[in-house]
Image (spheres, rainbow, N blue to C red):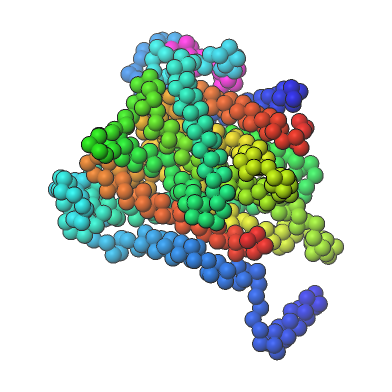
Amino acid sequence: MSAPGLTTRNTETIERALDIEGRSLWTDARRRLVRNKAALTSIIVLSIIALMAAFVPFFWPYGYADIDYANIACAPDWWPGTDAACRAGGYHIFGMDQNGRDLFVRVLYGARVSLAVGFVATLVSLLIGVTYGAIAGFVGGRLDELMMRFVDVLYSLPFIFFVIILMVVFNQNFFLLFVAIGAVEWLTMARIVRGQTLSIKQKEFIEAARAAGVGTFANIRHHVIPNVLGPVVVYVTLTIPTVILAESFLSFLGLGIQDPLTSWGVLIADGKDHMETAPWMLVFPALFMAVTLFCFNFIGDGLRDALDPKDR
Amino acid sequence: MWPYAIRRVLGAVPTLFIIIALTFFMMHIAPGGPFDAQRHLPPEIEHNVRAAYNLDKPVWEQFAIYLGNLLHGDLGPSYKNHDFTVTQLIEVGLPVSARLGLSAIILAVVLGISLGTVAALHQNKATDYGVMGLAMIGITIPTFVTAPVLALVFGIYGLHFFGFDFFLPAGGWNGGAFANMILPVTVLALPQIAIISRLVRGSMVEVLRSNYVRTARAKGLPNHIVIFRHALRAALLPVVSYLGPAIAGLLTGSLIVETIFGIPGIGRYFVEGAINRDYTLVMGVVICYAAFVIVLNLVADILYALLDPRVRFA
């Protein structure tokens, strides 16, 4: 075990002597990502939305369930046009909803739910997909064939229907929503990871690790997974908006989040019902959702360019 | 080709079986039976009702009965729409949904290919950026946003120019009248137009750089023949292989579009059935959709092999 330690120490000495900074794949990628204007703007915008969503109860005077019966479906003060039935006044910059609740705080609470579902369900799909794909690709042979055939069968199922049935059967359980969506999205992840694993498996360093007596699972964990992370990260940023869409889709149909909690899908559905008299109820949630989805798409594209420079 | 098609159809049978089994057992895990909410019945009558719907038998036997009836095209009675069987409801709704979906896919393919080709021919110019920007918007903004917004703009505010007031119906089906179809078909087709135009642009750009296109140009063929007869034919292959996922996307979209525009198709049955816990109706629609996806995927695969001589029916 002294040999690797020695080399590390040697490299360290050389680096210190030459006074150069080591540049790993990830530092390189980060630099390229930051230089990509669309991606950088998207990261900043998303962070602002996420921070506002996280801290809104601390700085906003209205709660998400506070009802003001005097101001039901009132327009914000600055709303153009004179035909609005009433003006909300106060700090209601986005106006009021059909129950007299402040729309700004509700849009941000919707962001909380949508982003949380996006991240958690993606994490679920990441865990299942990476493990499944890495095992199938690394072990190979009949097991690989069996596992991937199973994925093929699941692929051909109209999955959103199953999520809907699940939500109906289990009474719109919030936790189940995460799991159900995550369990749908892991299939593509598994395919990507398997494909990458198949090519990495042939590399010399895996052979060396095997020769050194590293077992299958240790090999997968220490050598395969770190090396498939590039495409996985790109796919994750593209999975999050898909998941947000799926959740909003369910909520829109009335099968997701229940009142008084809310999500962008619920807000858009409410806005649709009142769009003739209170168009702001449709405009703001739709705008926030569209901006978020755009940002994730730009970040995904930026990451792909950053991690795979030969593709540019 | 026929042996390949037959093999694919046989391969689809287990998939369909899994779908049927999954939905059936999920429905039966659901707490409460279909007749729980009704007023309390005397035990004998309740027993008879349960017997009439075979609910007194073990689940496995119920499943076998359901499968047997399914083979005869009988999807059972609807639990909530009394006096109707699921088959009757689907017979009414399916033509509506099929008409909507088919119009949308035709519109998406025609517009998507045209836009993608135009963008590729003007690569890195304003037209290209314009089309691709629109495509990005079309992909990102979900159907349940575009549908109400378009209904608001064209159905309620209306278009006003040169003293004319122009409104499109913001809902209803009206027996499939053309005016009633414009908005739902547009909404349904938009994301697919976006995706197809991106696909076509990408493959067209690549094909236009290939050697055989250069040869065709060197032979002195006129531009339109090079583009339509040589380049486009090869550039369309990704579109054909995308048709399967496109159909799945249309089905999902149809749930939203039929609900928002109040169109009496099977998508709306599904949503209403799911909310009202009309399990037999939900199952019937899922089976119907699944069968559609499988058949249309098969058609897409065969089409692909017919267009690309390099693909053999393996």
Going by the image, does B280 lie left or right of A223?
left
Going 43% across and 32% down the picture, which residue do you hit?
B185
**Front-most of residues B256 and A13:** B256
Going 35% across and 39% down the picture, which residue do you hit?
B150
Residue A269 is covered by the magenta coloring: no
Q: From what the image shows, is residue B35 above or below residue A45?
A: above
Where residue A149 sits: x, y (%)?
Answer: 70, 38
Going by the image, does A252 lie left or right of A223?
left
Q: Quadrant of the N terminus of chain A?
A: bottom right
- Magenta region, mostly helix, strand or loop? helix
Going by the image, does A279 lie left or right of B284?
left
Residue B63 is covered by the magenta coloring: yes
Going 17% across and 46% down the picture, which residue do you hit?
A84
Where residue B12 sits: x, y (%)?
Answer: 66, 27
Where residue A34 sits: x, y (%)?
Answer: 53, 69
Q: Residue furthest front?
A: B220
Q: Residue furthest bottom?
A: A17
Question: Which region of the structure is painted magenta?
Answer: B49-65
Going 42% across and 19% down the picture, which residue do you hit?
B79
